[in-house]
Amino acid sequence: MTTPDTDATVPDTATATPSQVPRMIVLMLANLALSALLAGLMLVFQEHLLDYQLAHLDVPAGTDLIAAREELRSSVWSRLLPVALVAFACLLVIGGLRSGQRKAYRQVIFISVIVLLGTGLTLFQPFPWWVRAVNVAKALVVVALLVLASRPEVRSWFRRDQPARRG
């Protein structure tokens, strides 16, 4: 007669990584890929983007359009720096999520809210359809990430009294 498996072979549900955590990492990587795509498209189609924005601005008569175009050009470049910073932060946070660090969990929430707000703000600015489409996709990914992060098993795995895990 054989004996049933002992509890030593069954993973402890309190220490096992919730299935949502790897999904959260995938969503963070998807957001990162969409951000890189948007940055690349903005660089490649920079002149088209500037033409579109200039055509949709309310400029008073007599405004120097060349100066306005250069100001818009600098704003395109200023949008690319935050994308790079968020990308770097996401890579650091992913490592923390894998090891079960509460700090990384809080950073996921913070970054997600910032990305959601920033993405929402771009919907009220004059951008071509392709910028809006990528931003809507980013917003959907971040909402899904926040939904996963708010699951009770994820919140309890990252609760304050849990020691940091390795693995």
Image (cartoon, grey):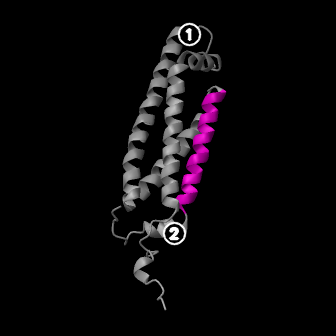
Q: Of label 2 and label 1, which has the lower sequence position? A: 1
Question: What is the spatial separation of the Cα atoms under label 2 and label 1, in whole angstroms?
Answer: 55 Å
- The picture quadrant where one finds residue 147 is bottom right
Q: Residue at x 34, y 65 (%)?
A: 165
Q: Residue at x 42, y 69 (%)?
A: 159
Q: Is-magenta flag for residue 152?
A: no
- The picture quadrant where one finds residue 82 is top left
Q: Is-magenta flag for residue 142?
A: yes
In this view of the protein, which residue sits in the foreground, 133 or 125?
Answer: 133
Residue projecting furthest to the bottom? 1
Where does residue 117 sit, x and y in percent of width and height?
54, 44
State whether residue 64 appears in this view: no
Where does residue 100 sit, x and y in percent of width and height?
39, 62
Q: For the magenta stretch, what is the residue range?
A: 129-150
The label number, if any, that marks residue 65 in the structure image: 1
Which three-letter amino acid code belongs to the residue tagged 2? Glu
Where does residue 105 sit, x and y in percent of width and height?
43, 58
> Helix, strand, or loop for circle 2?
helix
- Depicted 71 relative to depicted 143: above or below: above
- Depicted 84 relative to depicted 66: above or below: below
Q: Which residue is mark 2?
A: 153
Q: Residue at x 58, y 34 (%)?
A: 122
Which three-letter amino acid code belongs to the residue tagged 1? Leu
- Depicted 105 relative to depicted 60: above or below: below
